[in-house]
Image (spheres, grey):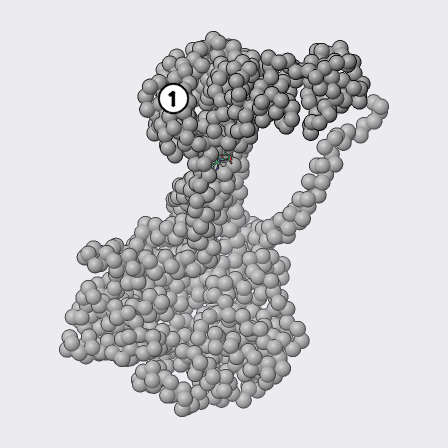
Amino acid sequence: MGSIELTAVQKSFGDVEVIRPLNLDIEDGEFVVFVGPSGCGKSTLLRLIAGLEDTTAGSISIDGQDATDLPPGKRGLAMVFQSYALYPHMTVRKNIAFPMRMAKIPRQEQAKRIAAAADVLNLTDYLDRRPGQLSGGQRQRVAIGRAIVREPSAFLFDEPLSNLDAALRVGMRLEISELHKRLQTTMIYVTHDQVEAMTMADKIVVLNEGVIEQVGSPLELYRSPRNLFVASFIGSPMMNIIEGEMADSHQASAIGVRPEHLSLSTDSGLWQGKVGVAEHLGSDTFFHVQVEGLPKPLTVRAPGDVELQYQDTVFVTPEKTNLHRFDSSGLRID
Amino acid sequence: MKRLLATAVAATLAFGVPALTTAADEEINVVMFGMPYTNGLQKLAGDFEAETGIKANIDVIGQDVFENRITLSFTGATGDIDVVHTPVIQVQRWVAANWLKPITAEVDAMAVKSDIMAGPLDAYVINGEQWAVPYMAATGLMTYRKDILEEAGVDVPDTWEDMLSVAAKIHNDETAAIAMRAVPGQGFNMFIFPMVMRAYGGKFFEDYTGGDLTPAINSPETLEALNVYMKLLNEYGPQGAGNFNFAEVNAAAQNGQIAFALEGTGVVAQIVDPAKSKFADKTGIALPPAGPAGRSPAIAVHGLGIPASAKNPELSARFIEWAVSTETMTKIALSESFSNFTTGPVAQNPEVIEKYSKVHPDFLTMQADALNLAIGHYRPLLPDWPALGQAIGENINAALNGLVSPEEALEGAEQDMKDILGM
Amino acid sequence: MSSNSKQRAGATYELERGYRRMIVPAIIAVAIFAIVPLAGMLALSFSDYHLIRGSNGEFGLRNFIKLVNDKRLVNSIYVMSVLSLFGVAAQVIIGTAVAVGLHKIVGRWRLGRVLFLVPYAVPHVAVALIWLSLFTPTLSPINAFFDLFGITVPSFLTSQNGAMFAIIVADTWTNFPFTMLIILAALQGISPDLDEAAALDGASRVKTFIFITLPLLLPALLMVTLFRFIDSLKHFPMIFVMTKGGPGRSTQATNFYAYVQTFQNSNVAYGAAIAVLLFLMAALISFYVAKLNQRISS
Ligand SMILES: Nc1ncnc2c1ncn2[C@@H]1O[C@H](COP(=O)(O)OP(=O)(O)OP(=O)(O)O)[C@@H](O)[C@H]1O
Ligand SMILES: [Mg+2]
């Protein structure tokens, strides 16, 4: 069990309202990702759920029970910190055992769970080391191990991978996803990396300045972003946003089209422009094309083997079906 | 060998002491510990320079720091002190340690010499040489609350016996009968207790004046005195009397918490000073009580000496002459609470008389009477006295606070005396 | 190449040499300000130097043999131990408690830290005078207050235990800010995440303190205990001002006894021997604690 419901939750630090009143339902077993730019309130929201911050207004219920004023230890949640927050004076074994010790779980049971967690997380050889003697990835695993053994109703992760290098990050991302598949426990995962969000989430919550911009599955967000913010935040590289005359012709104040939904041709197309910088990724190449009449170049995805020279003249054509239209307040027009 | 060891002493102490100033040609360093006279003298340093062109750096420091400072300077013979505060109680020890320079000729040449009271001046004569010049002689006096005695219908006690019976009559929870110094130390309880001891015929040695320095403190006379002292403080003293020093006695008297105080003139002057105590106008002054063996007011003489290592003794002597001159003394007597000066003519100064008569009409006469009665060796004038006084004081205080019986205390004191004197 | 017997300097050689140079002034200062007086003291302790009676030039263990049979020394060590053990314990416990309290509210109440530092800034003699009057029944507002209700507060300074208690109180009052400051700094070095992690792990505040905070403070606690302990062996101003070693000799801690021997009894050599003994005790304690510290931090 691990359903979480936020109702009109609001948080201010002094005069600064960091979380505007918001509602959010998280269902049991869901993998929910909070994503948004730095400072938007992701961590704060997570900490409100964890009980590490008091809500200014609103209520939080966990598994149908009101938990608004419950201390963190009584919420049945486990959290993995960005800094890992391992107890430096305890061995890996003791770190993992700590929540069980606090819960007065019998020693035998403790040992069993530690062994199991160590097995899953490849920590068996490191159980008697101190955190200071482990690599970043290993520390991360210990932190996860300490979370698992409590058998919490939900896991909370606050940017757990941001201290790892790119390769390790991809590996750990998979491990966490696998863990979720196996445990089927609710996970709430904070990141500002939208690739992590897209790849891991069942449900993404896009936050901006303390407001939920949109909640939905990765594909929903990709296909029908509710507004300009989500449109430009989700997807990589970023969606091209075009305003002005070209948007007017589509009866919108802005139109958006993703790089992968633009086609490139050397002889004909809707918009004419000049090739700027090209980013070769091997399988794909992203061209920055300066279309006449637009303030910024468009990013266009092309197959990896397309060869174009700097300043070549090209034509760009958007796919009609994947054109997003937004009104003057930035909201999607369907 | 001795030089080497002295260097060792100096090295050991040197680093606990602030940087030393070395005297320039026309500059002298004076080190003294805090008292009304020394504080007053410090303020007059400018006068000395104006008169003589010699700059005097007068350092007035705490008594414990003083010990450290002079031991360093004198054992190391650093010559950084030109004039030193010399209590008579220490002079024997210092002379034995070769710390002081004999100044007989210098003092003879001082015009002021004939004006200095003979008793205190002679207290500094050892082996026929003069070692320092006195500036003050504090004596022991008793203060009493006239109103309390009147109310109880009793007279001022003349003997310790009287004191015991008066104390029993007037002692109550509000106002205790009497307080005296009790903390251990040759300058603390051992400044006061001998007044009782000597009144009962107790003595430190078999025959001090005759030269028989066999310890004799464990005598029936001293025991009787100790019992009186203890009974007074334990039964008729304020709560906590067993740890009183002069400051506590002074405060208790000024706050009206005691009827009798036995103190040195410096403290007595404050107890009876209307500017300092609400009870001053109800307070009388008397000589300390007598006993079967008579009356023996305490005496403490302080003076100025010249360290053996002083670089420019002539300048030092000029400073001392100025410091004990009638003029300087008068200034200090007027500016500070300083009545126990030893330069005679100061007492004839009308302003001084007026000032201290205002403090208390009987004050100057009582002080003079006590000085007449006091014996020079009230506390023995021996190099070992600081050690002996400390040890005896500790034993007396132990008995007072019930750690040992009075008999054990005197036995212990006598044994300690023998140990110190190597007997 | 193999004939090159010269040891490799290694990549960090330059850096290390730089550090080594940095401690040169400290070594010189220690040599002058610690070694020289210490050597002087050691030389004296083997001698027979008496300020009044001088020296016969005898050197030997005489003073140390005398130390072994000196009952007053035994008493002084007892007094010193009581003052140091209880005093330091109180300072560490109170200092830690205040530090933990201040740490939690430090953002909101910076003045608090300054306020608690005040006692540390007061000179020891002044501290002793304050507490002397607080423990003197005729002067103490505490006694006056209880008198209003007809309660007589006992007199502390006239019994050995009471006097030691009073000295410990004064010593603790003036020195706990030191432990507080060090512990506060140590607390600030502990990541707040750990507290939060422990909270989520279901640990109460008390358990968090016992299982997480305290173990992490241990090195700092040891350090501060050592510092305070060694410093407390030098007990002097409090005793000198508050009891003069009394009642009787019952609060003459070893350092005070050394003072009595050196300055009152003129027995410089014997006083030096006591000082050497004190130094050895301090050195021994430092050594042990340093070893303990190593074990804990490894
Ligand atoms: N204890 C606090 N007191 C005052 N303001 C705070 C506090 N904690 C956070 N804030 C503010 O609240 C806002 C949201 O902070 P939060 O840490 O939730 O952002 P975030 O989305 O997690 O950002 P990041 O991606 O950088 O971690 C920020 O503007 C931050 O400055
Ligand atoms: Mg964050």
Q: Which of B177 and C12 is in front in this view?
A: C12
Tell me the chain of label 1.
A
x%, y% of residue A50? 42, 26
Q: Residue at x 41, y 25 (%)?
A: A23
Q: Quadrant of residue B218?
A: bottom left
Indicate left or right for C280 with B226 as reference: right
Residue B234 x/y as whole percent: 24, 62
Q: Where is residue B99 in the image (x, y as percent from the top left)?
A: 56, 69
Query: Badge 1: few (under 14), some or many (20 or more) residues near its Cα, within 10 Å?
Result: many
Q: Residue at 32% of width from left, 24% of height from top?
A: A66
Q: In which quarter of the image is residue C47?
A: bottom right
Where disc 1 sits, the SS reads strand
Residue bearing the label numbered 1: A5
Q: How many labels does the image show?
A: 1
**Can residue B247 be seen by looking at this rendering?**
yes
Residue C148, placed above or below residue B266: above
Given residues C103 and C234, the one toward you in this image is: C103
Give the quadrant of residue B387.
bottom left
Question: Picture coordinates of residue A314 (x, y %)?
Answer: 76, 17
- Closer-to-camera residue (B350/C75): B350
Would residue B229 appear left or right of A303 to someone viewing this image? Answer: left
Position above or below: A89 against C140 = above
Task: Tell me if I can see residue A111 in this picture.
Answer: no
Q: In this view, does A261 lie above or below C124?
A: above
In the rendered image, the quadrant that contains the N terminus of chain A is top left
Q: Residue at x 22, y 68 (%)?
A: B175
Query: In the image, is residue A105 above or below residue B347?
Result: above
Q: Looking at the image, which is closer to me, A227 or B192?
A: A227
The residue located at (62%, 67%) in the rendering is B21
Give amino acid for label 1: Glu
Residue furthest to the top: A182
